[in-house]
Amino acid sequence: MMLIQRLLPIVALTFGIAFAAQAADTTVRVISDRTPSHLEPLFEYYRTLTGVEIESAFVDKGLIARLQSRPTEADLIITKTADILEEAKQQRLLRPFDSSTIAAELPARFRDADDAYITLSYRPRVIFASKERVEPDSIETYADLTDPEWRGRICIRSGYHNYNLSLLSQMAEDQGLPAARAFIMGLHANLARRPKGNDRAQVRAIYEGECDLSLGNSYYMPIMLANPEQRAWGKATYLIFPNQESGGSYIMRGGAALTTANRNVPAATQLLEFLVSNAGQEFIVNTTFEYPVRDDVEMLDSLRALGNRQEGIEGGRFKANFIPLDAIAAHRDAIVTILDEVDFDSDR
Amino acid sequence: MLRGTALTRATRTRTILNNLSFEVPAGTTATVLGPSGSGKTTLLRLVMGLDRPDTGELRLGDQLLSSPDRHVPPQKRGMSMVFQEFTLFPNLDVEGNVAFGVKRARDAETRVDALLELLEISQLKHRRIDNLSGGEQQRVALARALAVAPRVLLMDEPFSNIDAMLRQRLFERLHSYLRANGITALVATHDHQEAFYFSDHILVLKDGRLIDHNPPRRIYEQPANAWVAEFFGDTNLLTGAELGVLAPGRPLQPAARYLVRPETIELTDPGSGAAAATVAKTVYYGAYQEVRLRLEGTGPEIRVHCTGPKTLRVGEQVGLMLRTDAAPHPINDEPAD
Amino acid sequence: MSTLRRVLTGLALALFLAPALLLLFRATAPLETAALWRLADTVLPGYVATTVLLAAAAAMLALPIGVGGAWLTTFFEFPGRRLLDSALALPLVLPSYLVAIVYRELSHRFDWSPVVESPPAAAFLLALTLYPYIYMLTQASFRRQTAGYLEAGWTLGVGRWRTTWQILLPLALPAMLLGVLLVVVEVVSDFGTASALGLRTLTIAVHRAWFSQYDQALAAQLALLTALLPLLLVAAYGGLTQGRSFTTLTNRPRSPERQHLSFSLAWLAAAACSLPVLLGFAWPMLWLLAWAAEAIDRFRLRELYGDLLNTLLLGIGTAALTLLLGLFFALTARAADGPHWRLGILSVLSLTYGMPAIALAIALLFLTGWSYQTAGGAWLADTLLLVLLATTLRFTAFASFSIESGLAGVSPRLDDALRCAGRGRLHGLLRVLLPQIRGPLVIAALLVFVITSKELTLSLVLQPFGYGSLALSIFRFAEIDLYPPAALYTLSLVLVLIYPVLSLNRWLGGRP
């Protein structure tokens, strides 16, 4: 009996949440593939600020499938990979936002042409290099990684991971598909080992001496430096922003968009506006170590230090290549085909 | 000679076998008889060597098989056993089961065939076990136990699932097979008819104690006590004084009690015989008619089994006397229940 | 069988079949096979080979560990035997992928710890965490028939070894095969371990097609291909045992007199039984404990309680539902004339269990999509019920199988007797039939509870808003290399599962 009494509130909560959510105007539902701990403090802050309750589902896999099957389940999507927003837009799963604030405050390169989605933050996909074994300025572009000098010295995660697919698609748009194909083949030829693990595992492999260079997102450097167990990995490497002389580094974008749900569009739009406000941006930058979409947001020291061994990089500021997401998405299938042909993830 | 001396086996909570001593001469068959729970199966398992006695000894001829500090493992005893639940191997067919224990493969085929023939299951040779009826399984189990040519064969309720007509035929065949091969057999059963047919000796067990150990006729006619008497058939337990009425002139102790089997009392015409009685109840059993009679005066009810064409009716007057060749057996204890 | 029953069974089977049918539709309807053929020309053969090799190697490694452990603990007496008897089941409480991560981490930290990021090593790790299925099922089979058949062998002058070899092992074969089947299904549908160790399996390919290429047709085609391997095994199992399992869970167990081993052999046996427990449980647990100790004061326990309650709710709910459905299916198969219903039910349930969890999850998403437009449907999807539906569909096979094997040991004459008893059917079912198969019911409930509590993929895709569970949190922390909190949550999961796993082992052994 005691147990039942204790469980009842939980059951009621589980089953009652939907009614509560649909009834209350002051609730916004957010679906996201981000790590919960990156967003929850922001949501909590927003609630104390505005009184608006945010309900969230963190769907790390199949976010697109969920959007397709239940387009109106959430009011707002927040993603770490804005590429899927372009996919969602093409499938008519997004509602263009109508906000003078965003139009005024967010530069056009961070907005979709049709205002279907926005970029919330971005991080370049950079080169991690061994402090001991790679001379500064010996690498300047992604294509430099294909130089035979680096044969057997490069580590990378699976070529089919969203980050790599996005990077290679950007390269295909930027330099043409043949160049991307040559890069994939050259990179594959230079790999030290079978692609496996996440971005941090590649840096660790540099630390452990298995390779000298790797590709990864920039935020992993501050994250590793903040973690006592991983600090040594980060310290063994330095970061190179590639393509600074030629169009800029390729970037991964975090983004947000409204769904087609019409339950609470004003409140959802308001949250979207908050996300690009100075306060919202600070939250995002401080938890994710990504780059803000506003210039007036204070950069963390750990970000300022990025690229400090590279000539021409000051205070972590680098040149990014803002290729429109629809152009990137168009190359995705072709890139996968090349990866399959090369059998990119195979043992060397 | 299979000989048990002062065998005892107990669990934490109760004594299953209590100080049991017995002898089964080589080549003879003994039946262990008793109600369920009397320790029959335990005795067989102990002889087989599946269980060990807490005290006492078990010998086969000169060989010490079991004692508190010596134990010949079951597979080295030259015995075999038919389990009450058969315990046939379900992954082998009939032939595979019967041949399982046969040492020399060359002998297996002919011996298996002969035994299947003997037990009338030749047609089942290649059948799977789970397709057989209970009676068929029982015969396969019997064939399997015989196939290893044991010195001693132990059987736990070996005919319980076989119907009456076939049972009679199998009794005879098995009996002569055991005799012909000089096999000593110990059979546990609760059916005294089966015991009579089979046994040279009967061991009567009750609550783990051996309460009688004799040839069948002796057990029936001169049982150790009233319980045994009643276990083996209908009884009249009469005092010497009461019996004297039916058998005048016999030297009887008036206060002693005697076992008088119903078939040893003769009914005569009214007015003749030794005593007069009234029919109180009759039951027809086919082979005989059981008649319950009340003696003139206040005597006890007496059961008589009578054969022949005559039908008695309740209330009829008859005469009554003990057959002259009957020997009433004195019983010393109180009747059970 | 009554018409009502036929219709109800048909409907229930249709519900179970729906995800597979949708998958089939998605795979074939667009007639887009170009991507599949291109894959077949390039990387697909490698994916298939890795999957088959991984499953076969894991099964072949788990088989001797499981059967060996069951054999030693059933037949022999050696130091620590009673303890090891239970301990051998323990690796089942840990999610496989977490054990893989622990070993991966250790290989980086210590030179003496072997590298595990290769298919053979992965197969070994999977075997280490999955062998308890084989161990428990084989031991149950041994327990329920050993004593009688060993004794029967002795009475025929045949020693322990020959009876073991010719009778006991063949009799335990169906149990071993069933264990191997479970191991193979788990390996084939595993995502966590393969992704942690960087292996290229078919399930990984399904994930890739869905989440990196957004190619539903290709993903469905690959999912069907993946489901083929477990299905073939189910068919092989059905063919080999021909629907007969020599043991039924209702057999009364009796332990044989265990053989005492010589001093050195006894310690060897103890070592052999300790090794899988040490490698599959104790050693990873030690590290998880060490990591958890770092996290204990850094994390908010309140969130952990919420996850814990959700895990319990889902586990208990799934166990109850699968039990009801399993009972319904098993009784239908029992009442039917001929084997057709039984075979039909078996194949539909195994198909739903055999397809990769991710395929089932996505199929359910699309199947329930239309209903989200309705108020009631939205309510359903917003509660735990959709996850519950998914876990129920996936794991009813366990309940049905266990209950059916239990009912096989109950005489059909009992049904007739109940029909003549004059009380309602339900009364007979509740008062007479169910108590007879109490063991199989408890076993099914425990097994489903354990497996549901560790379940990851279905919750990940279908979770309602505001939901969290232990398995989800463990996965999320592990994914971003935050091992201390992952370890803390894993320990909570271990606490939830350790008693069910141990009692599962006891019930299977027939010693409640």
Image (tube, grey):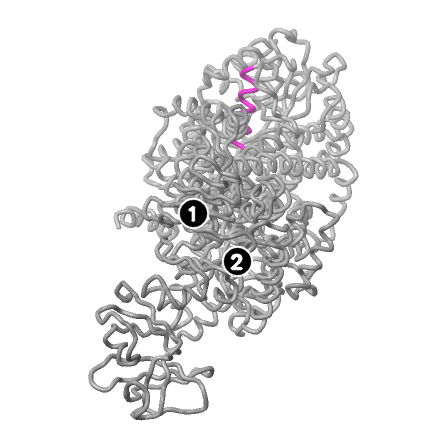
The answer to whether residue A117 is seen in the rendering is yes
Is A166 positioned to the left or the right of C376 in the image?
Answer: right
| Secondary structure character of the magenta stretch overall | helix
Chain ID, mark 2: B
Crowdedness near tag 1: few (<14), some (14–19) or many (≥20) residues, C-alpha within 10 Å: many
Residue at position x 63%, y 27% from top? Answer: C121
Label 1 sits on what residue type? Leu
- Please tell me whether residue A281 is drawn above or below residue A72 in the rendered image: above
B315 in the magenta segment: no
Q: Residue reaching furthest left?
A: B298
Q: Which residue is tagged 2?
A: B29
Q: Position of residue B169 (x, y in %)?
A: 60, 70
The answer to whether residue C359 is seen in the rendering is no
Chain ID, mark 1: C
Along the line of sight, the residue nearer the viewer: B3 or C433: B3
Residue numbers of the magenta segment: C97-110
Q: Which residue is tagged 1?
A: C314
Residue at position x 63%, y 38% from top? Answer: C59
Is C20 positioned to the left or the right of B301 in the image?
Answer: right
Q: Nearer the viewer, mark 2 or mark 1?
A: 2
Along the line of sight, the residue nearer the viewer: C86 or B151: B151
Residue at position x 58%, y 24% from top? Answer: A199
Along the line of sight, the residue nearer the viewer: B152 or C379: B152
Q: Quadrant of residue A151?
A: top right
Placement of the C terminus of chain B among the 4 image quadrants = bottom left
